Image (cartoon, helix red, strand yellow):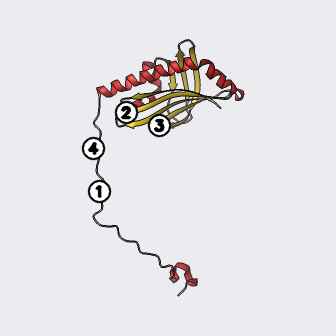
Amino acid sequence: MGLKIEHRVGIAAPVDDVYAIIADINAWPEWSPIHKKTDARLSFGAPIHLEEYYEGLGTWETDGFIADWTPLSHIHVSVPKPFYAGTLVRYFEFDILSDTGAGFSIGAMFNGYLSEREGKRYRSLIRTGFEAFGEALKSKAEAQFAANPYTPAPQVAKATPDAEPLAKKKPNWRGPKLFGPFGSK
């Protein structure tokens, strides 16, 4: 079945600004309350190393790789485990709510018997850490946007054609050109 631990937060800043903060993975320890050390570059298959501190749980080291990534949409990190332990996928997802509003989700998906047991055992501690991360991101993105807001580009009206497009010539279904030498005359 799988177990999902997730925290979602709305941010009063454009998704571009939120994504720029998350895409700079190596800068997370500067503002994230749970990340003590990060080492990664945003590229398909690139390794990622996270040292995260969860209150009541201690420091967790996560070694994985960027499994899927789409700018302004999501970053998925796959964490390899032995085949009998199941799978773990960490994810960071973005939603465009408006020109100056974004949604952000941080989560973990545990699949497989042993992996689900691990997730259930530490669910409340992990969720608390995810909430702290989400709120810190919200504060940082909103502060950056408030300090340097931009004005959205004006909407350009689409041109409407003055005349109807040229009518296409209808095919001659009975002509010899359509069916070759076997067409009717």
Q: Which residue is mark 1?
A: 159
What residue is shown with label 3? Answer: 73
| Residue 55, above or below 127 | above
Neighbour tally class for label 2: few under 14, some 14-19, many 20 plus, Cα within 10 Å? some
Q: Disc 2 residue type?
A: Gly
Q: How many angstroms separate mark 2 from mark 1 (CA)?
A: 29 Å
Q: Residue at x 52, y 78 (%)?
A: 178
How dense is the environment of label 3, judged by Cα within 10 Å: few (below 14), some, or many (20 and up)? some
Label 2–label 1 contact, CB within 8 A:
no
Reading the chain from its start, which is encountered first: label 1 or label 4? 4
Q: Amino acid at mark 3?
A: Ser
Query: Which residue in the structure is indicated by mark 2?
Result: 101
- Which residue does the image show at 69% across and 24% down from the upper left? 114
Give, as a three-letter code, the residue at label 1: Ala
Are circles 1 and 3 on residues that touch, CB within 8 Å? no
Residue 164, compared with residue 35, is above or below; it is below
Label 1's element? Answer: loop
